[in-house]
Image: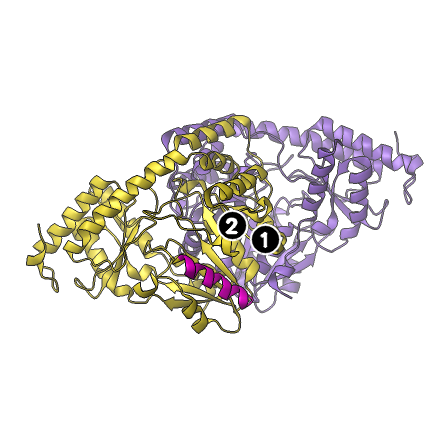
Chain colours: A purple, B yellow
Amino acid sequence: MKRIDQIEPFRVMQLLERARALEAAGRDIIHMEIGEPDFPTPAAVLAAAHASLDRGDQYYTASTGEPRLQQALADWYQQEYGISVDARRILITPGSSGAFAMLYAVLLEQGDRVLLPDPGYPCQRNFVRLAGGEAVNIAVGPETNYHLSAALLQQHWQHHTRLAVVINPSNPTGTLIDPGMLAHLAAHCRDHGGYLICDEIYHGLTYGCSPASALEHDAIIVNSFSKRWAMTGWRVGWTIVPDTLIEPCRRVMQNIFIAAPTISQHAALAALASGEASETMRQAYDERRRYLLDTLPSLGFQVAIEPQGAFYIYASVAALTDDAESFCWRMLEEAGVAITPGNDFGQFRANEHVRFSYATSLSRLREGVRRLRSFLQHEHWAGVGIADIPS
Amino acid sequence: MKRIDQIEPFRVMQLLERARALEAAGRDIIHMEIGEPDFPTPAAVLAAAHASLDRGDQYYTASTGEPRLQQALADWYQQEYGISVDARRILITPGSSGAFAMLYAVLLEQGDRVLLPDPGYPCQRNFVRLAGGEAVNIAVGPETNYHLSAALLQQHWQHHTRLAVVINPSNPTGTLIDPGMLAHLAAHCRDHGGYLICDEIYHGLTYGCSPASALEHDAIIVNSFSKRWAMTGWRVGWTIVPDTLIEPCRRVMQNIFIAAPTISQHAALAALASGEASETMRQAYDERRRYLLDTLPSLGFQVAIEPQGAFYIYASVAALTDDAESFCWRMLEEAGVAITPGNDFGQFRANEHVRFSYATSLSRLREGVRRLRSFLQHEHWAGVGIADIPS
């Protein structure tokens, strides 16, 4: 198959496009499909961007990023996690996407295997294929918090396996990797001559816990300002690599994107100092999370493991349907509620699952729940005891 | 060889790093190596960016770009070139780098051949290798204005040749493709089941001529706001693809960069309307160009074809040295003038050539010329009749 034909579209994007078309035609749609913060970028970050424009910061930075931002991130790791890291190892990228595109270009040879969890972030499989690698999707479930485990790595690690890639907390499940397991994963990869890459983009959006960074286990870290600081459109993130990879990464960065956007890098400096704004957002997400966790089961959506991070709830719809994708399209068209079908995230039991995003205000989430309940009751949805659903 | 080991560093970046180190130690360095406008981003663009921040434009745009920017570019092609193009075919990318990374991912399979001019823009070879393709460097000289010709395509196009990639005006030579030849190049690629990609990033920076866009010959176009509008650090460009490629391009864009920076896209809308600012810059570049063309030959730098575009002069140093790279390092260390050795741009007669950039003020260029003359005279530089150099 041609490489381009192996690249899957995001189903959520198709759903979103349809939702936008319905809105353009006058329908009101509740967006529980989008993985993008609904909060504005913090005021301090906007102020820093204005100041950067006024200073005329429009030239390229170094390929590896504005040195002050690298140093500020090193200081932030000390303060946030108590980890000391050389600022030179922190490479500034155009979002976490830029980091992954670059890392796979540096680390993979044609045919190299990359172990990924299924369900997992859909771009990962496509990134790996674009770099000529083979994405190995490993079924994960509640028994491992929907994460790779040392036993799964042991089982699937073969010749030409080069990487295991995890995202902690997980997209789509919002669940965390057990801290002891994180150390085991990193050790397994290292012992087998490979690397663990840990995507920590939802760090800072956790509820009742503060996960450690896999940096303390010498994993390669990917992170971004997009989620925690509500800076998606700014396109700025970072990766932390071992000393030996700095030079090859720099070579690839010089070529594939030259540098991350300059104004965004200056704005990101202010983000690191804006702790209060991000704490306010975190509390709002937590309130929404608790509301949905309290409510969804009564509609027939079952949540196997309480998510402690990100802004997602991964729920079984097995009691409602055996075709989550059709279910989601019907919910959009008939109930005006957009949710993402499981098959955006892999194949393992994908047709039994959907992902709810709560990057939408509590009042809109309440309206979404009201519509779902009304629809499921009115339709006398087959396979669920509708009479048991409280109104 | 491992893929990453095929990726060459930019020599100009090493030179620039050393220049910065010398500056940090108190030396004054004339920068004639950097391919980045020295002008500030036009005021109207900055104003639009401020307004965009105030409006809260911080979310992702569609992967293919903000629709109003796509439409504005379509209108701009009508106005600038008299070409009508469907806005849907114009895909907004993070700089021209993002466009190339995406296009090669879409168009190349492992081992596909891509025909490139030597000398040429160094990233192209690396982009092709990163995508698993084979970069075929074709020696070009003054007889074809340092560009690929139909005869050269005929000679080098084989099975598995998929693309020819040109940049018009050229980096590093500043020369233009003959308009008739451009049509022939596009026809050749099309007739052989491939594509011509034409990088037009230096359009608008031409002197005494206005090149046509290869869009009228149905080539794939890559362009950017970086050079003409002095917006390098903003990371926003575009590509124009045939209808049939929109969907595969969108799939790759969703994955590898999600979208170009949002604020930059809104600023770019204002750039398209700021014709006067870019004309002022163009006239300043032209003045510098004429100064260097009048002066460099008297120092021993020979220019075979007068460059009519970009902000580069590609000069032979055969009268001065047979090792352009060592020559450039000596000029930097001993004369405080940074210029780029030819081997950044390929191998063909690379050791006999250097690239001067005139993205530096006229007064600094004058000082650079003064230093070069003084150095070459004082040193009684071997191989050139120094007595012949006028003081």
Residue A49 can be seen in this image = yes
The image shows residue B107 at horizontal and vertical percentages of: 55, 61
Q: Which mark is residue B333?
A: none
Chain letter belonging to callout 1: B
Q: Pointer 1 and pointer 2: residues touching (CB < 8 Å)?
A: yes
Q: Nearer the viewer, mark 1 or mark 2?
A: 2
The image shows residue A249 at horizontal and vertical percentages of: 44, 54
Residues A52 and A181: in front is A52
Relative to residue A88, is residue B287 drawn left or right? left
Judging by the rendered image, the residue that carries numbered circle 1 is: B249
Instruction: Name the image quarter holding residue A228.
Output: top right
Give the position of the N terminus of chain A as an image quadrant.
bottom right
Residue B60 can be seen in this image = no
Instruction: Tell me the amino acid under the disc marked 2.
Output: Thr
Instruction: Tell me the amino acid under the disc marked 1.
Output: Cys
Q: Residues within 10 Å of mark 1 (few under 14, many from 20)?
A: many
Q: Residues within 10 Å of mark 2 (few under 14, many from 20)?
A: many
Residue at x 38% of width, y 58% of height: B178
Q: Which mark is residue B239?
A: 2
Residue numbers of the magenta segment: B179-193
The image shows residue B146 at horizontal and vertical percentages of: 34, 61
Residue at x 81% of width, y 30% of height: A370
Residue at x 41% of width, y 31% of height: A53
